[in-house]
Image (tube, helix red, strand yellow):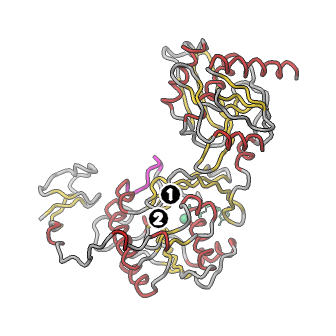
């Protein structure tokens, strides 16, 4: 016999006053059976690996291009994908668009709406222009009832909006509690695997950014996608945090329009749209988001500090990377930052997690410190070593190609960079050289204005 916490589902063989997992008081109750009871005769037969059906064969494109980009090619039959995001991000819109497109392509789709009425869903579908006859909707909050619907209808694709608002009466806890969310998800995952239904779950993200029903859910499902953006802006970013059927490095970029989510036609142009050319502390670099090169603006601000220890604040950059780059600037290129605060950020909200932007960040810091602008038509590419040396980054030609397309004519790059037609490459060995070529020509441009 086990004791189970009603709040989080934690099992313990001994009664305790306080749950060691979630910290709730008096929440442990007797009742859970030891898992030995579940031992049964296996229904499965081991088989040679080569005889196993490859899952890729049963992959269904959702028809929403940016969602398919993140998923690799589409939804795998029997897989469960969790789409998490803050309220108002557009999760319901994304799921309805995907289901509508798949239904139009002939898939039997079932949307379980546990938060909105079917009438509300219909209004949204009209707005999106997706009223396919193969898209069925049911307003249901009970997990057993959802399972019964799926068993009788046998859909190809199932979506539940949201996993926090369905309840399993057999599980402990209130709707939306960790135990409930986990139990409900586990039941749906079992059913999806059994009946080979590609399943989408919508999950709300709490204020601190974690998927409610914490990491427990991430282990239960096959893929976790995160839908992010600023509610006051139209830009939406979709990325995979976990993906059992492909890579997790693709970024989906969409725009919320009056008729639903539309793929972003030219992301680089959008990210650079509001740039103020000729300002100090601004440097453009080209990063890779999965298979796609993107040009983004790195910004730095350097100001005398009032604090005993100067601050280094990174936004959309790794803060440990910023500290390292500040140290390299100080020690290898004699940029005086000891009594200055350094702020660095990436405009547009894209996160930079690769070292390919190192040189751009360092140049932005030096440019801000010296109040000298980097030439507005120059793109900067390169990784910085601790010795101040500049190193080549992967896929440099593709990155420079994207910069060229956007009108950049010069590039500060590592020594080993191959030629690019139509672009002047300023090859540098280390940060000191990079500062010389970038800031010297920048100041000339500035003086000439
Ligand atoms: P919604 O999909 O309901 O978000 P979530 O399920 O993540 O809470 O949509 C959120 C917002 O998007 C809502 O404020 C209205 C807006 N919206 C549009 O701008 N255009 C549209 O076509 C739709 C359907 C919604
Ligand atoms: Mg919603």
Mark 1 neighbour class, 10 Å CA radius: few under 14, some 14 to 19, many 20 or more = many
The residue beneath circle 1 is 225
Rounded to the nearest angstrom, the CA distance separating label 1 from label 2 is 7 Å
Residue at the (74%, 25%) spot, across then down: 374
Tell me the tag on residue 81.
Answer: 2
Residue at the (63%, 74%) spot, across then down: 101
Q: Secondary structure at mark 2?
A: strand
Residue span colored magenta: 207-214
Residue 59 appears left or right of 120: left
User: Contact, CB < 8 Å: mark 1 with mark 2?
Assistant: yes
When the figure is inspected, residue 329 is found, relative to residue 377, above or below; the finding is above
The quadrant the N terminus occupies is: bottom left
Q: Specify whether residue 209 is painted magenta.
A: yes
Residue 233: x percent and y percent? 67, 50
The quadrant the C terminus occupies is: top right
Q: Secondary structure at mark 1?
A: strand
Residue 42: x percent and y percent? 21, 76
Residue 230: x percent and y percent? 61, 49
When the figure is inspected, residue 371 is found, relative to residue 29, above or below; the finding is above
Q: Main secondary structure of the magenta part?
A: loop
Q: Specify whether residue 383 is painted magenta.
A: no
């Amino acid at each position: 016999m086990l004791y189970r916490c009603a709040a989080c589902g934690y099992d313990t063989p001994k009664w305790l006053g306080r749950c060691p997992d979630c910290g709730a008081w008096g929440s442990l109750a007797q009742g859970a059976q030891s898992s030995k009871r579940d031992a049964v005769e296996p229904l499965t037969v081991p088989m040679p690996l080569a005889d196993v059906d490859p899952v890729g064969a049963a992959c269904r494109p959702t028809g929403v291009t940016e969602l398919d980009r993140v998923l690799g090619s589409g939804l795998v039959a029997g897989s469960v994908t969790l789409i998490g995001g803050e309220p108002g991000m557009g999760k319901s819109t994304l799921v309805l668009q995907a289901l509508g497109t798949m239904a139009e392509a002939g898939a039997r789709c079932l949307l379980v709406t546990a938060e909105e009425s079917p009438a509300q869903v219909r209004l949204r579908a009209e707005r999106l222009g997706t009223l396919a006859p193969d898209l069925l909707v049911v307003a249901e909050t009970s997990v057993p009832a959802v399972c019964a619907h799926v068993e009788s209808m046998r859909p190809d694709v199932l979506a539940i909006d949201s996993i926090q608002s369905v309840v399993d009466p057999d599980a402990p806890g209130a709707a939306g509690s960790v135990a409930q969310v986990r139990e409900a998800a586990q039941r749906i995952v079992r059913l999806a695997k059994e009946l080979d239904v590609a399943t989408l779950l919508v999950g709300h993200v709490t204020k601190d950014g974690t998927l409610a029903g914490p990491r427990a859910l991430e282990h239960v499902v096959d893929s976790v996608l995160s839908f992010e953006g600023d509610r006051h802006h139209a830009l939406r970013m979709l990325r995979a945090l976990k993906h059992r059927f492909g890579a997790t490095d693709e970024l989906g970029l969409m725009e919320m329009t009056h008729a639903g989510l539309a793929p972003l036609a030219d992301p680089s142009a959008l990210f650079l749209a509001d740039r103020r050319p000729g300002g100090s502390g601004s440097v453009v670099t080209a990063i890779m988001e999965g298979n796609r090169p993107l040009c983004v603006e790195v910004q730095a601000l350097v100001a005398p500090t009032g604090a005993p220890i100067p601050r280094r604040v990174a936004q959309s950059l790794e803060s440990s990377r910023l500290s390292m780059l500040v140290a390299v600037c100080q020690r290898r290129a004699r940029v005086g930052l000891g009594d200055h605060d350094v702020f660095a950020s990436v405009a547009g909200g894209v996160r930079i997690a690769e070292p390919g932007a190192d040189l751009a960040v360092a140049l932005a810091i030096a440019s801000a410190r010296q109040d000298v602008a980097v030439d507005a038509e120059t793109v900067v590419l390169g990784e910085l070593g601790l010795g101040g040396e500049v190193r080549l980054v992967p896929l440099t030609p593709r990155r420079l190609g994207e910069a060229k397309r956007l009108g950049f004519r010069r590039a500060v790059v590592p020594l080993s960079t191959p030629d690019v037609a139509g672009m002047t490459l300023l090859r540098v060995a280390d940060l000191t050289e990079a500062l010389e070529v970038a800031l010297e020509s920048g100041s000339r441009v500035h003086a000439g204005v």
